[in-house]
């Protein structure tokens, strides 16, 4: 998997967990007790490896694609099986075809702590992985163009604010690799965006002069 | 005496002695809008590239880290949190405009104490031998006049066992992607630069300098020549960017 897709997924998962924890001090306290432990998750479908590192700091959980330290527990299975393991009462790893290596205690503690937590896992995953291949560079550039146009029409000062704000909250999804298939669409969209930028530029110039 | 040798500044040939001041001109010019342009140009993806770089650094509390060509301090901010109060991060850049924006941004984010800013040239690092656990240079190496000299300088100040990470634009793996990317960077990028930073030339330079930068295998060879071992690279976003890693044995 391209590390930028992996990193997008970890950023999305990390912020989903930490966002949910902000409103759930009990689960937060429980997870903080796991400080120093590391959960390795190897997904078979879609493929990828992630490491959840627990700490008692400000960020209770950080999610990594690369980890060189010790791993407390390592799970291997499909994304759907792992989601069921975390949220279904009485779900066990062997029943779901998930292999567990290392300490099983961490898994039990996590199931207890995360079971009560209200995290929209599907949304977080879908956001980061699900529809990456469905996107085309055309769409990305078209929406980027529309977005740019939208804020540009509200003036340059606003544009700066909107940019930091918008890009910080929504994990970026545009993945060039997946777009290559659709080159015809691409150049069309690029033309359109180029035209749009031209238009914006002349509009702004006209406003400056006027 | 003047140095008759020439080097590239984007697609232009300029005297070796002139490149640094031309590069400085670019970054003085873009400093204030640098972060905004980064987000717009890459669609925010540069954050993911940097995120992966931090992971590959395997930085730990208490370490001493150099972020050279660190500019506005994105990596420094992350390292500062990781190394904690016992550790130290040096944000170094040749350009004081970029450093100033970086220092202000770090303060705005409440990052102080374990971060120091130093104006320094990557080719002649003003630090003792065997000093750092980790050195990062993100989107900086292509701007340096003598890259081999810079790599050797980083090697010198790294501790044995320490690692160098070079995050830089590279060569797309597929030629199709390469074409799309060319369209984007030569047609759209300068337009965006003009629109947002009022400066098309600087962004044209950025696009050109990316094309002149050594590809994945060449840079890996240069790192090996400088003495690094276990050199490897990871292509990201289809090779538009690559992260090179080397260890000082
Ligand atoms: C594209 S910026 C990258 C900034 C930051 N590392 C990032 O990733 O956002 C390149 C930086 O390299 C710096 N630079 C150029 N030549 C340099 C040199 N010889 N030594 C140190 N820094 C240099 C520039 O001043 C500029 O701040």
Image: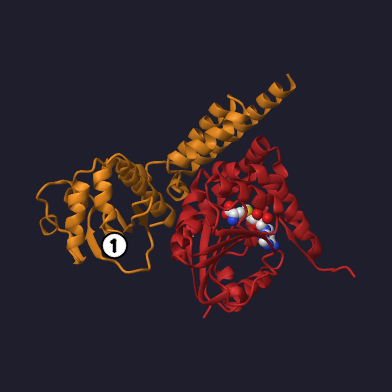
Chain colours: A orange, B red
Number of numbered callouts drawn: 1
Label 1 marks which chain's residue? Answer: A
Q: Could you tell me which residue is drawn at 53 percent across and 38 percent down? A: A164
Screen quadrant of the C terminus of chain A: top right
Which one is nearer the viewer's eye here, A16 or B8?
A16
Q: Label 1, secondary structure: give it.
A: loop
Which one is nearer the viewer's eye here, A20 or B146?
A20
Q: Could you tell me which residue is drawn at 70 percent across and 68 percent down? A: B146
Is the C-beta of the residue carrying label 1 under 8 Å from the nearest atom of ligand 1?
Answer: no
Q: Where's residue A206, x and y in %?
A: 70, 22
**Residue at far bottom of view:** B249
Residue B169 shows in this picture? no
Residue A20 shows in this picture? yes
Kindly identify which residue carries mark 1: A37
Which one is nearer the viewer's eye here, A70 or A190?
A70
Residue B53 located left or right of residue A83: right
Q: Could you tell me which residue is drawn at 74 percent across and 22 percent down? A: A209
Q: Quadrant of residue B192?
A: top right
Which one is nearer the viewer's eye here, A17 or B48?
A17
Name the quadrant where ligand 1 sits: bottom right
Screen quadrant of the N terminus of chain A: bottom left
Q: Where's residue A89, x and y in %?
A: 11, 47
How many neighbours does mark 1 have within 10 angstroms: few (below 14), some (14-19), or many (20 or more)? some
Residue B8 located left or right of residue B235: right
């Amino acid at each position: 998997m391209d590390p930028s897709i992996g990193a997008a997924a970890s950023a999305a998962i990390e912020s989903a967990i930490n966002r949910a924890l902000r409103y759930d001090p009990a689960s937060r306290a429980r997870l903080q007790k796991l400080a120093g432990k590391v959960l390795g998750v190897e997904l078979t479908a879609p493929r990828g490896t992630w490491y959840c590192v627990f700490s008692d700091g400000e960020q209770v959980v950080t999610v990594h694609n690369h980890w060189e330290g010790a791993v407390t527990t390592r799970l291997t299975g499909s994304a759907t099986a792992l989601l069921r393991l975390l949220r279904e009462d009485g779900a066990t790893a062997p029943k779901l075809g998930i292999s567990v290596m290392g300490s099983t205690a961490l898994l039990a503690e996590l199931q207890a702590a995360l079971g009560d937590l209200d995290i929209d896992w599907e949304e977080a995953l879908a956001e980061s992985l699900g529809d990456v291949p469905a996107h085309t560079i055309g769409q990305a550039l078209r929406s980027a163009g529309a977005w740019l146009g939208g804020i540009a029409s509200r003036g340059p000062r606003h544009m700066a604010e909107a940019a930091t704000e918008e890009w910080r909250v929504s994990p970026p999804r545009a993945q060039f690799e997946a777009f290559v298939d659709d080159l015809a669409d691409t150049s069309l969209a690029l033309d359109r965006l180029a035209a749009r930028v031209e238009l914006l530029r002349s509009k702004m110039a006209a406003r400056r002069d006027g | 005496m003047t140095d008759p040798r020439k080097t590239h500044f984007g697609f232009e040939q300029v005297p070796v002695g002139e490149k640094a001041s031309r590069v400085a001109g670019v970054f003085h010019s873009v400093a204030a809008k640098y972060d905004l342009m980064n987000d717009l140009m890459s669609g925010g993806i540069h954050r993911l590239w940097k995120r992966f770089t931090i992971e590959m650094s395997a930085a730990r509390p208490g370490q001493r880290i150099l972020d050279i060509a660190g500019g506005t301090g994105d990596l420094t901010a992350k390292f500062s949190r990781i190394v904690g109060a016992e550790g130290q991060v040096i944000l170094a850049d040749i350009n004081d405009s970029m450093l100033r924006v970086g220092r202000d941004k770090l303060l705005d984010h409440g990052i102080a104490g374990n971060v120091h800013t130093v104006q320094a040239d990557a080719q002649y690092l003003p630090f003792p031998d065997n000093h750092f656990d980790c050195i990062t240079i993100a989107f900086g190496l292509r701007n340096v006049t003598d890259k081999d000299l810079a790599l050797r300088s980083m090697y010198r100040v790294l501790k044995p066992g320490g690692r160098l990470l070079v995050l830089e634009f590279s060569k797309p793996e597929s030629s199709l992607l390469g074409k799309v990317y060319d369209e984007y960077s030569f047609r759209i990028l300068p337009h965006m630069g003009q629109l947002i930073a009022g400066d098309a030339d600087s962004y044209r330079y950025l696009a050109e300098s990316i094309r002149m930068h050594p590809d994945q295998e060449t840079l890996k060879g240069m790192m090996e020549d400088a003495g690094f071992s276990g050199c490897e690279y990871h292509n990201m976003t289809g090779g538009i960017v690559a992260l090179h890693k080397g260890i000082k044995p």
